[in-house]
Image: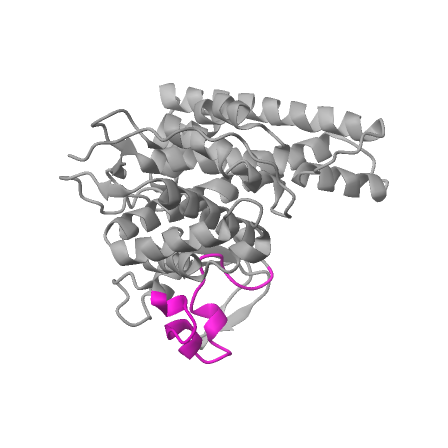
Amino acid sequence: MRDSIIIDLTPARQWDTPVPCACRHLLWGPTSAWLAATICPPLGYDSEADEQRRHLTLQVIGEAVLSLPPDECDRVFPSLYLPVMEESNARALRPWRCYLPGPSWWQYRSRIRRLDTYITALIRQRWQQHCSGWQPEDPDLLDKILSSIQANKTAWSSKIEQQLCFEMKTFLLAGHETSAAMLTWTLLELCRNPELTQQVRQEAVQHLAEGACSVASIDRMAVTLACLKETLRRYSVVPVVTRKLLQDDELEGFQVPAGTYIACCLRAVHDLWKQPASWLPHRFLPGGEYESFDDDVRPFMFVPFIQGPRNCLGQNFSLLESRIVLGQLLSDFSFSLAPGVTHEPKLSVIPLAPANGLPVYAS
């Protein structure tokens, strides 16, 4: 068993470089505090790294979308939002749970109602601030939407409040679950690959340095990005998506009528690569396998964020956030897998995560 130590806390540092506001609290001072409290356990204990990453990515998207501070995200979302998502996953595979009014059924309804009330109150308060002429220094996503409503002189109504509440919940889901799963699987693979771990660590030291970090510098973390992309290919954390045909179409010689739901198996696409079961980040480096695909096929050989006009609008934010988190973790800590734990995916939830979690030792 490896000893685990808590690192010294460093003071928060000032930013003059254009990193998105919602990602700034991930760096240095605040990150060190979070790591010391959650990732780095007392001597001899292992840490449930996958669950901690869910909380972290919720904090990030909570700030980006609603300007919520980390402690407020921790107060609200683990008790309301995460249980709702767990029950929704259960209902996707066991739909009869929707119709059996047992304890979980009532808890699910109650949590959704309380979550909707909480988010709607935030939206209403922010709208009143905008109407009074308030201008935020760092506008979040909700601010931008409300400014657009004002600019278009759209009449405010309860329907707009309800729609915005649903949209905010969608951003919370899409903005944290996939990122958390990606970070968990990537950390697992890096624990098995010390050479790549060192390369990621070196990139973090070089490009996340105090006073020198910007979006441009993070974009130069090529090996780190390749590791994250290969995780999305290898594990396909969202393995299937559906689309509903708006008009009659022909697929592979078959006539498919409008209104049909099409299941798109993203995992099957990612299994078309060479050695699909192997985690090989060099595929995404210059000259790698990704570049070998024909131009007309290449965009559709890597589809963790889907392709086309309905692809994930948060994909760049997710990959930016994940490079910062992964780089900071490996700059400050060394990780090893806890013995005796298998890491098969839990197939009953989306996004896919290790069935037994990811216990690790941090030192």
Taking 82 as reference, is 347 above or below it? below
Q: Quadrant of the C terminus?
A: top left
Taking 101 as reference, is 249 above or below it? below
Q: Residue at x 58, y 57 (%)?
A: 216
Magenta span of residues:
282-309
Taking 187 as reference, is 135 above or below it? above
- Of 334 and 147, nearer the camera is 334
Where is residue 245, by image quadrant?
bottom right
- Of 341 and 243, nearer the camera is 341
The answer to whether 346 appears left or right of 328 in the picture is left
- Counting from the top left corner in percent of width and height, residue 141 is at 66, 40
> Is residue 102 among what the camera can see?
no
- Counting from the top left corner in percent of width and height, residue 358 is at 27, 39
Q: Residue at x 78, y 40 (%)?
A: 147
- Counting from the top left corner in percent of width and height, residue 278 is at 25, 63
> Does the segment drawn in magenta span residue 307?
yes
Q: Quadrant of the N terminus?
A: top left
Tell which residue pokes out farthest to the bottom in this image: 294
Q: Residue at x 46, y 54 (%)?
A: 206
Taking 82 as reference, is 349 above or below it? below
- Of 199 and 60, nearer the camera is 199
Where is residue 116, by image quadrant?
top right
- Of 112 and 81, nearer the camera is 81
> Is residue 153 among what the camera can see?
yes
> Does the segment drawn in magenta span residue 227?
no
* Chief SS of the magenta region: loop
Q: How many marks?
A: 0
Q: Residue at x 37, y 74 (%)?
A: 289
Colour mode? one colour
- Counting from the top left corner in percent of width and height, residue 98 is at 41, 31
